[in-house]
């Protein structure tokens, strides 16, 4: 490899910055264990970095790097069970197949948009989301702390995540149109 | 299969709490109803986005830093067991005209990543041919310098010229003062990390820790910019102190006026002299500057709020009714004259005043009262960290104290005049330094520690009493 010019470094880190939120969420959506999501997303960016010469810059970088992540995860399903970073091989295979059959274009998302969507949640949902994702409390711990059942906590979290995702996609759509 | 069972399995899957049996059940359900995949995918995706927004360890800046650290590691999975990760999208040929690329230096990418994150233009941030932009004015303790090209240097000397790059003061005892070529001075007490650049406009990125700077007048269209994780601070000419923590930035303006942009929502606030401003990631915060209160010579610790390093013991004392803070190990790296050495401290660190509170002034006639408990006769050091009353680092002063044998519940009375500058060959006493600043210095931290062997130290209360 030769020298990477300053403006190209800037371009690459700028692209990482633009695409990392969506890429990490994409990795997770293929059934990767939460603790390994960032690891795989980084592998994808590092591969992209080393294969930069092969990337046509007129094309969608996000789609390209998601493709790289897709292949890393597909390789992951072939590993021994004890070394896997995925939650369940069969489920991940189905998720991979779904993506392969219908790869969708995804606009980039900012952490700020996610936070704005979280602000729309009802107070209890907000408390549970904070407890689960900021303080990393389990559903059982949250249930005990807030006097709810663990099942109830999971249901509220499910609804909250549904709302957040819808809100994010709506915002992305509105931003794209404007 | 009813919907609640599906939801139950999906929620457990998202939480990584599904048993092998339940995973199989979920897989079979999805095979029968492929539309469930969409819900599962949406739940997983949303869970990750929320985690990125809420968990500091997964913040975009953290991700970029970790990515930089992995640049030197092998990227591809082991080829003997995995296929290389190739892009799914077909790749166009005809790249010959492009410039080839190499792995960038770590320092560059850290700076670039952080600044890109902050929405800054990096054009010219590191000049292609390194130019000296500043000079080391004074330093103490262990300081690391990563200059252009990523070369890490630890044997820094007074008078040494610096290009753009990153300074890191590695321990609580270390600090460095540098001067830009136009006379703008900045002090970085440890532990802090600061990236500096000057490409006709000075740009700093305070990744962590504290920065004190006296800025000479800058061109109106090219203010000195200090970036932190939460704020962008623009300065034309003033004296100010900044402290950057993972989710908040504390600014104290002593002279002039400073413009601060809260990065989370772009809200801009002007901070006049003698005002402090706290910038967090909380949009609910009104982001208004607070007039600094009148200084005081009297201070009393509020535990556990003041703890910076140490273990809070809510009701841990068997023979003491009060609550306290217990020492915690801390590795201190310093230059011992024959290269760097690391020693283990058993440290308690307390912050003296927070944003918006009265500055606490310590005079040579002041008295520090420290009540606590220790389990053995190991010597304990008390150290105070001070700033000039108008801002700017003044020094870290030390005094070693040995309790009488068996004196395990102690109350030390340490006169301020007995403190001397730590890490100096000749003893320079507190009074000599404070005299040059009009008699008093601003007290910012109190540290207590033992070297090598733990003293079993617990602090119950610290008080500063003004001169009689």
Image: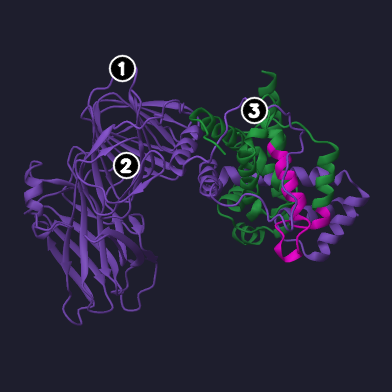
Chain colours: A green, B purple
The quadrant in which the N terminus of chain B is found is: bottom right
The quadrant in which the C terminus of chain B is found is: bottom left
Marking on residue A31 = none
| Element assignment for label 1 | loop
Mark earlier in primary sequence (3, 2): 3
Residue identifier under label 3: B96
Mark earlier in primary sequence (3, 1): 3
In the rendered image, residue B54, in percent from the top left (x then y), is placed at 56, 45
Residue identifier under label 2: B355
Instruction: Give the dominant element type of the magenta stretch: helix, strand or loop.
Output: helix
The region drawn magenta spans: A65-91
In the rendered image, residue B355, in percent from the top left (x then y), is placed at 32, 42
* Badge 3: residue crowd in 10 Å (few <14, some 14–19, many ≥20): few
Q: Nearer the viewer, residue A6 or B302?
A: A6
Q: Nearer the viewer, residue A12 or B153?
A: B153
In the rendered image, residue B331, in percent from the top left (x then y), is placed at 35, 63
- x 74%, y 32%: residue: B91
Q: Is residue B274 shown to the viewer in this render? A: no
Q: Is residue B263 left or right of residue A126?
A: left
Whether the residues at callouts 3 and 2 have beta carbons within 8 Å, the answer is: no
Q: Indicate whether B358 appears above or below A168.
A: below
Point out the residue furthest to the right here: B32
Marking on residue B220 = 1
Q: Nearer the viewer, mark 3 or mark 2?
A: 3
* Badge 2: residue crowd in 10 Å (few <14, some 14–19, many ≥20): some
The alpha-carbon separation of the residues under discs 3 and 1 comes to: 45 Å
Q: Indicate whether B342 appears above or below A61.
A: below
Judging from the image, mark 2 belongs to the subunit labelled B
| Element assignment for label 3 | loop
Mark earlier in primary sequence (2, 1): 1
């Amino acid at each position: 490899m030769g020298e990477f010019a300053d403006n190209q470094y800037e371009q690459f880190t700028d692209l990482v910055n633009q695409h990392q939120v969506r890429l990490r969420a994409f990795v997770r959506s293929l059934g990767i264990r939460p603790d390994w999501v960032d690891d795989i997303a980084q592998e994808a960016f590092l591969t992209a970095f080393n294969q930069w010469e092969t990337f046509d810059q007129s094309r969608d970088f996000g789609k390209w790097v998601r493709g790289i992540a897709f292949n890393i995860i597909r390789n992951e399903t072939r590993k021994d069970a004890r070394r896997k970073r995925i939650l369940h091989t069969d489920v991940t295979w189905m998720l991979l197949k779904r993506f392969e059959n219908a790869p969708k274009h995804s606009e980039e998302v900012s952490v700020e948009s996610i936070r704005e969507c979280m602000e729309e949640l009802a107070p209890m949902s907000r408390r549970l989301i904070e407890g689960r994702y900021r303080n990393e409390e389990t559903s059982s711990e949250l249930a005990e702390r807030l006097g709810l059942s663990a099942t109830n906590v999971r249901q509220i979290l499910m609804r909250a995540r549904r709302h957040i995702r819808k809100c994010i996609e709506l915002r992305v759509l509105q931003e794209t149109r404007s | 299969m009813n919907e609640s069972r599906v939801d139950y399995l999906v929620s457990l899957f998202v939480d990584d709490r599904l048993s092998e049996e339940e995973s199989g059940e979920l897989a079979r359900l999805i095979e029968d109803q492929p539309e469930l995949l969409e819900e599962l995918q949406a739940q997983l995706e949303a869970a990750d986005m929320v985690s990125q927004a809420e968990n500091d360890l997964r913040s975009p800046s953290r991700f970029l830093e970790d990515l930089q650290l992995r640049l030197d590691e092998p990227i591809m999975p082991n080829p003997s067991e995995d296929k290389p990760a190739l892009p799914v999208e077909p790749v166009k040929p005809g790249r010959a005209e492009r410039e080839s690329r190499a792995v960038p230096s770590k320092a560059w990418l850290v700076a670039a990543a952080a600044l890109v994150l902050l929405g800054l233009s990096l054009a010219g941030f590191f000049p292609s041919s390194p130019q000296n932009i500043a000079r080391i004015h004074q330093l103490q303790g262990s300081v690391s310098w990563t200059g252009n090209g990523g070369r890490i240097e630890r044997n820094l000397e007074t008078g040494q010229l610096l290009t753009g790059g990153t300074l890191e003061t590695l321990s609580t005892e270390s600090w460095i003062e540098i001067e830009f070529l136009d006379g703008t001075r900045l002090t970085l007490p440890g532990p802090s990390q600061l990236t500096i650049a000057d490409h006709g406009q000075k740009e700093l990125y305070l990744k962590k820790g504290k920065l004190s700077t006296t800025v000479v007048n800058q061109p109106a269209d090219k203010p000195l910019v200090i970036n932190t994780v939460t704020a962008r601070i623009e300065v034309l000419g003033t004296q100010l102190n900044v402290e950057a923590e993972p989710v908040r930035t504390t600014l104290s303006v002593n002279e002039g006026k400073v413009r601060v942009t809260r990065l989370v929502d772009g809200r801009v606030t002007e901070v006049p002299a003698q005002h402090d401003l706290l910038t967090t990631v909380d949009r609910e915060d009104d982001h208004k500057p607070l007039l600094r209160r009148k200084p005081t010579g009297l201070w009393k610790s509020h535990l556990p709020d003041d703890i910076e390093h140490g273990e809070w013991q809510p009701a841990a004392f068997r023979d003491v009714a009060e609550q306290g803070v217990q020492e915690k190990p801390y590795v201190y790296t310093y230059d011992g004259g024959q290269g760097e050495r690391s020693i283990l401290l058993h440290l308690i660190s307390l912050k003296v005043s927070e944003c918006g509170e009265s500055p606490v002034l310590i005079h040579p006639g002041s008295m520090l009262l420290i009540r606590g408990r220790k389990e053995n006769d190991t010597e304990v050091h008390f150290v105070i960290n001070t700033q000039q009353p108008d801002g700017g680092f003044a020094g870290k002063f030390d005094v070693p104290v040995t309790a009488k044998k068996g004196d395990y519940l102690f109350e030390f009375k340490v006169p301020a005049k007995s403190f001397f500058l730590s890490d100096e060959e000749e003893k320079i006493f507190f009074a000599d330094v404070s005299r040059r600043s009009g008699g008093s210095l601003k007290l910012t931290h109190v540290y207590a520690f033992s070297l090598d062997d733990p003293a079993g130290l617990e602090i119950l209360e610290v008080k500063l009493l003004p001169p009689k």
